[in-house]
Image (spheres, grey):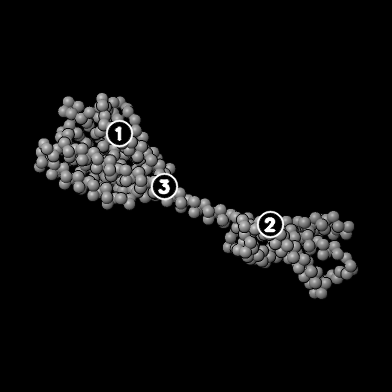
Amino acid sequence: MLKDKRHLLYYLFTASVVAVFLAIEDFFDVDSPGIAFILGELLFDIPKLFLVCIVMSFLSSWVVKGLNRRFPWQEALLKRFILEVSIILGLVAFLTIATSFVINYFDWQGVKPESDGDYDFELLTSIMSFITLFMLFTFHEIMRISDENIELSAKAKNLEQENYIARFEVLKHQINPHFLFNSLNVLSSLIYKDTKLADRFIARFSDVFRYILELNQEQLVPLKKELKVLDSYVFLQKIRYTDSLVVNQRIEAQALDYLLPPMTLQVTIENSIKHNIISREYPLHIDIFVEADTLVINNSYQPRETTEASTQIGQNNLSQRYKLLNMRVPEFYIENGQYVARLPLLKEKHAGTDS
């Protein structure tokens, strides 16, 4: 407790409150010694009362902890309240009797009581003891509640993080059947036209799908890994579209270690291919480059008149995964005849703190 500044400051505050009450009592006393003397006594009393508060705090903390184990507030509210008040009153009575005994028989101040029948000192001691104990017990109860709230908050945060991870995994696993479904469509169109080309397609397809399985537990991957698998993916698509699909990468070396959610590039490029006309007359040009901490993907905007049935993955999937990682949400818009995707990157692996 003594290592916690909050405790020491509160003990000093409690000592100051009690010392002020004593000073007020002296000020209104018939035989008041004067303001200067009272202020001197006030400054002298605070350190003594501070030490008393430290000792009494250990006692009150021990009592509160014991009551929490035997009679927690949640289970025995009335009984706990009665017990705690009774203990405080009992300690007040004990301190009053003990202090009176010390004053009368050891004469620390060198002044004997004028009359054994004068109970003003005992009354004052009782009031000051009650104020001190009440403040200390209240403080330890508040600290207990505060610690419990912090613990509950930490548990809730951990549960929330686990929930986010679980939701992220669900979103990420959606990519696997999505990619598989589209790739099998391409393969089905090739297998009867060119079996050798279909064999090459299957070999590259297995490389890409292996990457998906290897990253099954990853939330973030380096950009260089994404670019590597993108090369294989583009190769698969160029088997189908040949020179009608043009993908240009302009990535500086220092950006290769930036992080982003796995399969982000594939999903973005796949959407561009899916929703745009690709032919010799209308080749699809895709540019990939980095601006500051953002990966930019531009493609010529030439939408199909009829598009494939949407599986509701694509952009929504990416946006939700970025949100779950507390990263900036990707931007998708049309500008100057170009469809633009701006995908935030992290320079360090600290997802959950970047907002």
Where in the figure is residue 119, as x and y percent of width and height? 86, 64
Which image quadrant: the C terminus?
A: top left
Answer yes or no: is residue 251 visible. Answer: no
Name the residue located 36 percent from the left edge and 37 percent from the top edge: 316
Name the residue located 69 percent from the left edge and 63 percent from the top edge: 53
Of residues 100 and 91, the one drawn nearer to the viewer in this rendering: 91
Residue that label 3 marks: 164
Q: Is residue 177 above or below residue 76?
A: above
What's the amino acid at mark 1? Ser
Q: Secondary structure at mark 3?
A: helix
Foreground label between 3 and 1: 1
Residue that label 1 marks: 310
Where in the figure is residue 92, as x and y percent of width and height? 75, 64
Q: 10 Å neighbourhood of mark 1: few (<14), some, or many (≥20)?
A: few
- Name which of mark 2 and mark 1 comes first in the sequence: 2
Residue that label 2 marks: 78
Q: Is residue 126 above or below residue 179?
A: below
Mark 3 → mark 1, Cα distance in angstroms: 25 Å
- Name which of mark 3 and mark 2 comes first in the sequence: 2
Mark 2 → mark 1, Cα distance in angstroms: 62 Å
Horizontal side, residue 183 vs residue 106: left or right: left
